Amino acid sequence: MMFRWDSMLLAAALAALGCGSMSPGGVDPVTTSSTALTGSTTESSGEPVDALVFAAPESTGIPSWSVEHVQLADVDADGILDVVHTVSDDGSLAWHQGLGDGTFVEMDATGLDSAVTSLSLAAREAVGLEGLGSPFYPRPRPPHQLTAADGNKLVLSFGFDGGSAVGVLQPDDSGEWTGTLLAADPNHVIGLPVADLDGDGAAEVLLDHDGELVMVWGGDPERSEVLGSLRYGSIYPQAWAGDIDADGDDELLFFVNPAYGVGEAWMWSAETGLIEVETPHSAHKAWASAPIGSRASQFGLATRGKASWLEPGDLPAMRHIEGGDLEESAHFTGGNFDGSGGLTLLSEDNWALRYVAGAFEQIPLEGAQTGWHTLVGDLDGDGLDDLVDGGRDGSLAWQLNISR
Ligand SMILES: [Ca+2]
Ligand SMILES: [Ca+2]
Ligand SMILES: [Ca+2]
Ligand SMILES: [Ca+2]
C-alpha cells in the first residue's frame, strides 16, 4: 500500500514537472535521448560505417527492480559514462561507476544525496515553506550532465511538496557534493543543460519557467537572463546548441512538447533573440546528432513511420527534409551509431535511417533491441554510441555497438 502511494506521489511530481506518465519500466522518456561524454571519446575515431551491428545484451549487474529514472552521466568526471538513477523505495540517488567495458560498480551516493537534500531545503525555503517536508520528496528526475569543459556538474530538476525546482550539483575541492538552487516554483520549472554558447568554458543551463525561457549563463544564478516566452508550457523540453543558421556560431534550439507533437521549436541567438522556427506537423520525437548539453550538427524529428531532418539554413524556417521511411515503428532511438557524428535513427523493428548529403539512406541494422526504455551513450569510448536497456530481464542490460 505504501509503495502504491509512493508511486502515485511520484507520478504527480512528474506530471507537475511536465513529464507525463511514467514509462512502465520506470525510465523517464525525456532521458531516452542520446547522452554521452564531451571530448574525444564521442568523436569519430574512424570512417563512418555502412552497416550497424550490435552485440547480444549483457547485464550491467545493476538490478532494475530498484531503479527509476536511469540516466547516463559521467558523475566522477573520469571520462567514462556512469549510471545514475533514483531508487524506487525512497527516491534517493544511486550511482554506479562505469568501467568503460560496459560493467559498473555501485558507489557510495551519500554525498550526492546530501546535496539533493540541501537543494530540497533551499527550494522549500524559496517558496515560503520550512524544513524538509514530506519524506517522499525530493523525488528527483535524473540529473542531466552538463557536458562542458567545467567538469562534472549535474543539472537536477525535481519535484517537492511546494512545487518544482532546478539545481546544479557539483563536487567541491574536497570531493564533497554541493547543491546550488537555480529556481523553485510553486507551479512548473524544469532545467536543461546546454553546451557553452558564449564560449567562456562554462556550460549554460536553460530554465523553462511555465513557458518562460531563462538562460542561466554558466549555471551561475547571478547571471540569469530572460530569453522570452513560448506559446505553451513545456512537456518533454529538449534543447541543443548548434550552428542552426549556418553562420559559424552556435545558437540554441529548443523543442517543446514532442511527446504530443512538436508544437513549437524556437531558436535563440544574441543577435536575433528568441524566434520561432517552423517544424513539420505532429512529430512525436526530437533528436540532435549530439547529446543534450553538447553541440549538434543535425536535428531530427519523427512520428510513427516517418522521419524528418531539419537542416541548418535560412531562418525562421529551417530546411526540412521529409521522406525517411521507418515503416510503422512507434519508437525510435537517435544517436551517433555510425561514427559519422551525424544523426542515425534506429527503429524498434531493426531499421536504421540516416541523412547524408541531401538524401535519406537506409543502413542495415543487426541485433539492436530498442524501445522507449533505451538509453544511448558511448560506453566504451570507441566513437560509436552503444545502447543501455533500462527495462528488461530484471537488470539493466547494455549492448555494445560492434559495427567497426
Ligand atoms: Ca565516470
Ligand atoms: Ca558559457
Ligand atoms: Ca550560427
Ligand atoms: Ca561505443
Image: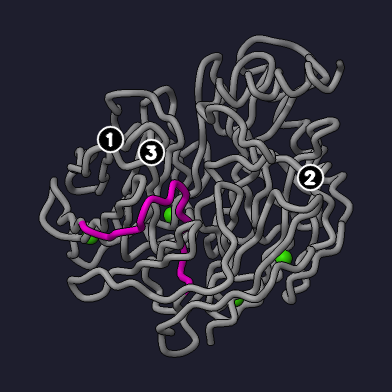
- Residue 108 is situated, as x and y percent measured from the top left of the image, at 89, 52
- Residue 351 is situated, as x and y percent measured from the top left of the image, at 43, 65
Label 2 beta carbon less than 8 Å to ligand 1:
no
Q: Which residue is mark 3?
A: 258
Does the magenta run of residues contain 55?
A: no
* Residue contact at pointers 3 and 1, CB within 8 angstroms: no
Label 2 sits on a secondary structure element that is helix
Side (left or right) of 391 relative to 136: left
Q: Residue at x 57, y 61 (%)?
A: 376
Q: Distance of mark 1 from mark 2, alpha carbons?
A: 35 Å
- Residue bounds of the magenta highlight: 323-337
Does any portion of residue 119 appear in the rendered image?
Answer: yes
- Residue 371 is situated, as x and y percent measured from the top left of the image, at 55, 51
Task: Locate residue 343: give its quadrant.
Answer: bottom left
Res 195 label: none
Label 3 sits on a secondary structure element that is helix
Side (left or right) of 68 relative to 285: right
Front-most of 20 and 141?
Answer: 20
Q: Residue at x 68, y 21 (%)?
A: 160
